[in-house]
Image (cartoon, helix red, strand yellow):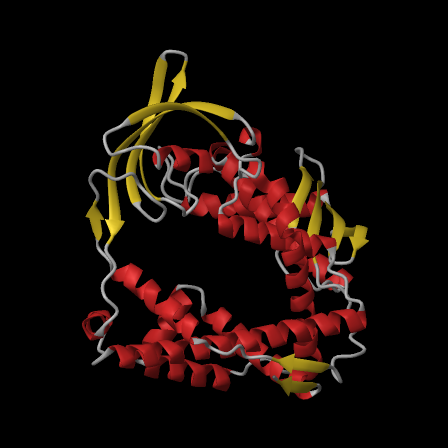
């Protein structure tokens, strides 16, 4: 029987294209298997289960049989492609230009992102600095004030125009000539950027209960490109103004925040948390600097297909609408390129030095997480598996091993 024909039609760092032709004989065999599968479970009027004629089943379930046939053929073709081309795919392939007419071969194309060939000639003997910024008293006070704002109640304000950081309730409607359309209620904190600047300025010129007609203009950096710089006639009504009354920074406030006997005890914990945060940021920056030096030493280029894939993941994660994709891609491309280069380096080190996290190491980390939460290890594992985050934990352990190895090959100066 003729075999599936696979032909590489395109290749670039990070991607490959393969033309696939499935012979008629294999198409017909796959179609017969799909028909038989439906025939066994089909319930058609006048026939016992599994006894309906194949021709009738094929006519009744034509679309489903066709879909099952194609899925099998694509699956088998992909196995053949992997065996023939020795690909290293990083994701499932995309199917393009699929064609299948009765009595003809099935043809289509695989487009797949692949791990590019990479050689790192130098991964060590760098000079790095690890700088931990000092936690100042001003930083501690700023954190305490953030806690005060979180605990502060909102109190209605009468006879005073709103100010930045006030909470306001407004209605904004669109004016078209003499008509007022689509009034919408909003609640927002002034200064947080939820409303365009000219709208916030108009709000701050009103007293509660007042209404004003105004023409405002969208800023030049507005997310929706079509609205940038465009005027809009609106009717704005301010209904209510609320202002936070910050609690005193004293022992009573510390007890309200948590199990602290005094303000000094709270201040101590806040400082410790900020110092731990500074340590984590110092480690993160050290890793970024190391990756940058490896990139420069080895002249690593981020392959375009992998960058596009990373951008697509970011866009989906941030919920970017399709019409904003070009602007988003332009803004985030450097981030995506850096992420791709980082991943290529880490994967190379893992592969060449056998640094992947072991099951024993993963189990130990699960026990540590369980101990902190006061939860059985089995429950922690089950929760991570359900949330599809167990692989993230394993990946994090692997990265810890990789960076420990890489940093041991260089000089790190503590500053």
Q: How many marks?
A: 0
Identify the image quadrant of residue 403: bottom right
Q: Residue at x 33, y 83 (%)?
A: 371
13 lies left or right of 393: right
380 lies left or right of 77: left
Q: Residue at x 60, y 73 (%)?
A: 285
Tell me where residue 174 appears, x and y as whole percent.
Answer: 39, 22
Q: Residue furthest top?
A: 178
Tell me where residue 164 appears, x and y as whole percent.
Answer: 36, 46
Q: Residue at x 49, y 85 (%)?
A: 361
Q: Residue at x 52, y 44 (%)?
A: 320
Can see residue 407?
A: yes
Of 111 and 259, which appears nearest the observer?
259
Q: Quadrant of the C terminus?
A: bottom right
Can see residue 77?
A: no
Tell me where residue 1 appears, x and y as whole percent.
Answer: 74, 52
Of 254 and 67, which appears nearest the observer?
254
Of 394 and 196, which appears nearest the observer?
196
Of 334 and 19, which appears nearest the observer?
334
Tell me where residue 167 appears, x and y as whole percent.
Answer: 29, 45
Residue 97 position (above or below residue 178): below
Identify the image quadrant of residue 409: bottom right
Residue 321 position (above or below residue 414): above
305 lies left or right of 10: left
């Amino acid at each position: 029987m003729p075999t599936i024909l696979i032909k590489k039609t395109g290749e670039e760092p990070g991607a490959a294209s393969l033309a696939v032709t499935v012979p008629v004989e294999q198409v017909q065999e796959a179609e017969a298997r799909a028909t038989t599968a439906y025939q066994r479970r089909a319930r058609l009027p006048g026939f016992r289960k599994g006894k309906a004629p194949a021709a009738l089943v094929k006519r009744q379930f034509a679309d489903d049989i066709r879909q099952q046939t194609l899925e099998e053929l694509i699956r088998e073709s992909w196995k053949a492609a992997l065996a023939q081309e020795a690909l290293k795919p990083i994701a499932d392939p995309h199917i393009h230009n699929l064609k299948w007419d009765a009595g003809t071969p099935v043809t289509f194309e695989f487009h797949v992102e692949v791990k590019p060939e990479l050689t790192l000639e130098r991964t060590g003997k760098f000079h790095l600095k690890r700088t931990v910024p000092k936690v100042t008293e001003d930083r501690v006070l700023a954190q305490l004030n953030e806690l005060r704002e979180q605990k502060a109640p909102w109190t209605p304000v009468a006879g005073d125009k709103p100010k930045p950081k006030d909470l306001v309730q407004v209605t904004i409607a669109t004016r078209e000539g003499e008509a007022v359309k689509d009034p919408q209620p909003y609640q927002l904190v002034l200064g947080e950027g939820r409303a365009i600047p000219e709208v916030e300025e108009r709000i701050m010129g009103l007293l509660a209960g007042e209404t004003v007609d105004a023409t405002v203009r969208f800023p030049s950096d507005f997310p929706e490109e079509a609205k940038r710089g465009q005027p809009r006639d609106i009717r704005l009504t301010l209904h209510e103004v609320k202002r936070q009354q910050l609690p005193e920074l004293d022992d009573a406030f510390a007890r309200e925040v948590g199990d602290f006997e005094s303000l000094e005890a709270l201040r101590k914990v806040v400082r410790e948390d900020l110092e731990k945060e500074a340590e984590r940021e110092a480690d993160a920056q050290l890793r970024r600097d190391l990756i940058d030096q490896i990139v420069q030493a080895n002249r690593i280029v981020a392959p375009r297909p992998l960058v596009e894939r990373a951008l697509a993941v970011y866009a989906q994660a941030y919920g970017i609408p399709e019409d904003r994709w070009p602007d988003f891609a332009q803004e985030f491309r450097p981030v995506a390129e850096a992420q791709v280069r980082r991943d290529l380096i880490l994967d190379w080190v893992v592969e060449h030095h056998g640094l992947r996290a072991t099951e024993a190491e993963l189990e130990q980390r699960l026990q540590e997480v369980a101990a902190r939460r006061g939860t059985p290890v089995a429950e922690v594992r089950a929760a991570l598996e359900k949330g599809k985050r167990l692989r993230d934990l394993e990946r994090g352990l692997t990265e810890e091993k990789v960076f420990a190895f890489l940093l041991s090959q260089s000089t790190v100066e503590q500053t």
